Amino acid sequence: MSDNEWPLWEVFIRGQHGLNHRHVGSLHAPDAEMAIKNARDVYTRRNEGTSIWVVLAENIIATSPGDKGPLFEPADSKVYRHPTFFDVPDDVGHM
Amino acid sequence: MPDTNHAIETDVTDSTAELYQWLLFIGDTNLILSHRVSEWCGHAPALEEDIALANTALDLLGQAQLWLELAGQFDEQKRTADQLAFLRDANAFRNALLVELPNNDFGCTLMRQFLFDAWHFPVLQALVESSDERIAAIAEKASREVAYHLERSSDLVIRLGDGSDTSHQYMQAALDYLWCYTGELCAEQKTDSVLIADGIVHNPVLVAEAVHHTVSDTLSMATLRVPESEFMQTGGRAGVHTEHLGFLLAEMQFLQRTYPGSTW
């Protein structure tokens, strides 16, 4: 990547129905203001959004794929952490 | 005193030709700029700019369609928006010369967009108050789109004008080249006077003040120098165009000219 390249931004959009902001993709922009404008042009052309967040991709701290085993596998064998052993009365409805 | 109903009817009949010409002016100006901007599709220097320009072109095309549809109602031949767009020759177009000029470099395209938006936005704001509710309704819808066009183009002009030495040079060269085509947008047109008096269309003198503020504020933030020459090109509204319009129409109208009446 050359020094002249604009930094990468990750874009999060809140949909029409008051849901959480959801990651929709990324784009390049020289600064935050342009990133918001570009996000508006690239990701909300079809009426997808009511709110936009952008964050510099380099500011996102991510887990490393190599750590997948130690981080996530221990949870695999802990079925008792899932509340699946309770009888839920029918009239409780959706939980 | 003449019979009131009769007087109103006479007024409406009398200004039909003028209103038709005015609607062609604003409709054609949107249409031709839309085509020019769309020429960047797939060629802009960054994907993000490419899609932003395509959005602008589509907004302007949608507005052109509304204006030309309305124009068709005042046309003696009752032509549709499509017929007006694709079956007229260059000397029948009434667009401002500014929008038919070639894109040249990206800086020139952005500068033209800014100079156009700086005029377009206050025009639409004024037209929202039009005594003709069809015009007011189109202006209402369009002004929301154009507010964003102006925000974006003025921001880019400031960034590039006040950017690197190279970008500053490009923007200054673009401004010097385009400047003499800006006067036509706000020029007073004799045929508009009856429409202005009836509150149907905007008063270009009042709009010119708003345009002047936006342009001088933005150019000063962009560290660009306004050209000193006061000579302004005109002719678009009389159908006297630059040589560039014919080439543009040859491409834009090719399909309807070669396969008349084809649809999809």
Image: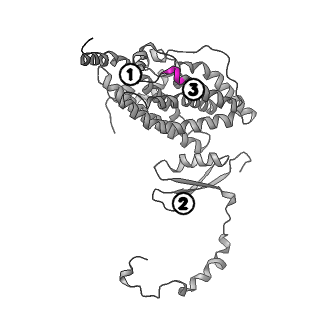
Is there any visible trace of residue B258 in the rendered image?
Answer: no
Chain bearing mark 1: B
Q: What element carries label 2?
A: strand
Q: Is tag 1's residue or tag 3's residue first in the polypeptide sequence? A: 1
- In the rendered structure, which amino acid carries the disc numbered 3? Val
Q: Look at mark 1 in the image and give the residue it sits on.
A: B88
Q: Label 1 neighbourhood size at 10 Å, few (<14), some (14-19), many (20+)? A: few
- In the rendered structure, which amino acid carries the disc numbered 1? Arg
* Residue found 54% across the figure and 37% down from its top: B149
Q: Is residue B23 left or right of residue B234?
A: left
Q: Nearer the viewer, mark 3 or mark 2?
A: 3
Q: Does the magenta stretch include residue B201?
A: yes
Do the residues at pointers 1 and 3 share their chain?
yes
* Residue found 69% across the figure and 58% down from its top: A58
- In the rendered structure, which amino acid carries the disc numbered 2? His
Q: Is mark 3 on a helix, strand or loop?
A: helix
Q: Look at mark 2 in the image and give the residue it sits on.
A: A21
Q: What is the CA distance from the residue labelled 3 to the residue labelled 2?
A: 38 Å
Q: Position of residue A63 (x, y in %)?
A: 66, 69
